[in-house]
Amino acid sequence: MGFDSFLGNTAAVETLREMLRDDRMPGALLFTGPEGVGKKTLALMAAKASVCERLRDDFCGECARCRRAEEMITAASEDLARRGEMKEAARRLEGLVYFDLQLIAPFTRYILTEQIRLSRQVAYARPFELPRRFFIIDEAQAIHWQAVDLLLKVMEEPPETTTFILICPNAGELRPTIRSRCQRVPFSPVEEGLIAKLLAARSQLPEAERALVARLAGGSVGKALSLDINEYLARREPWLTFLDSVTVGLRAPGAGSSSGRRSAPDWQKLFDATRALGDDREHFEETLGIGQALLRDLLQTLAGGQSRVTHVDLAPRLKRWAQGLGFGGIEMLKGGLDQAYRQQVRNINQQLGLDALAIGLASKEIH
């Protein structure tokens, strides 16, 4: 329990602990950084630490105020989820009540004007039960443009007993006047080693798969814990067949030759792979994301940076594919993936583009 249980971003934790020790919690904080690194979690921890009866720069989780803060967090989260599921948009704001510790997030696409108006009204009143009130605005970039001025007004004259914590991956998405009134707390990706230790403690995955998940997470604890590795591997498999097929039969350039040639691939196997990649339109963007990750690994491998590849379980195959494609083939692969990204919003048969890319790669000479 307490800040010691928070994973990574020790600088952000220490910044908050210093504020608590010095009793100088500002009227507005801005938590920025990648998704899934614990920005909302740490905001909730800071709120509990600010009201804890026993500790000055941490929270015990056991005193009456800590328990009451946890009850408020649970109630606010359940209320957000319930309102978000309502089909009638007009009913989402009915009976909206804010606690001393309140989560504010988009019900659908936006954080609505009425949500911010209510927070402004409550902010200037004394806290009902706790010594300090916290409004934690998740996905602050989603605040409706008509509500931004309302938030700005309360931030210009912040109440002594209220703190707003805005959570936003990219601070540039917020209006400069909002940013200028917040004390920024930056977050970084969580170290891969810490994520690997967390997975070892919480999952039953074999060590090799844990290493892959830790690398795929890209510093995001949330992604590491939510990633279905079996589903990912199944979606990745057609890419492996694709790359095996377009680099099959490579004869590396000899000392006296300027190029190497491949024998003809198994075209049926190759086109089965492109069909598998293009068939699932609902998840096609995720499929392309896997292709892009493999593309980056090929570049790293060809440039001698194999220790930095994402798909650590594919090291020998990555080396073979990279040698087979060369920089020219990797550039062609990148062009094909970029085109697929551009075309996915249109009603286009993606398999045809992948087929053409496969033919081009399988027919290319190695230079």
Image (spheres, rainbow, N blue to C red):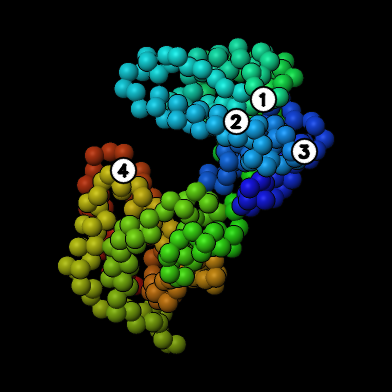
| Residue that label 2 marks | 68
Disc sitting over residue 130 in the figure: 1
Of the image marks 2 and 4, the number of the one nearer the N terminus? 2
Amino acid of disc 1: Leu
Residue lying farthest to the left in this orientation:
268
Q: Nearer the viewer, mark 1 or mark 4?
A: 1
| Residue that label 4 marks | 344
Q: Secondary structure at mark 1?
A: loop
Residue lying farthest to the bottom in this orientation:
255
Disc sitting over residue 56 in the figure: 3
Disc sitting over residue 272 in the figure: none
Q: Residue at x 23, y 57 (%)?
A: 276
User: Does residue 304 appear anywhere in the picture?
Assistant: yes
Q: Secondary structure at mark 4?
A: loop
Quarter of the image where the C terminus is located: bottom left
Q: Position of residue 167 (x, y in %)?
A: 58, 34
Q: Secondary structure at mark 3?
A: loop
Q: CA distance from mark 1 to mark 4?
A: 50 Å
Query: Quadrant of residue 244 in the image?
Result: bottom left
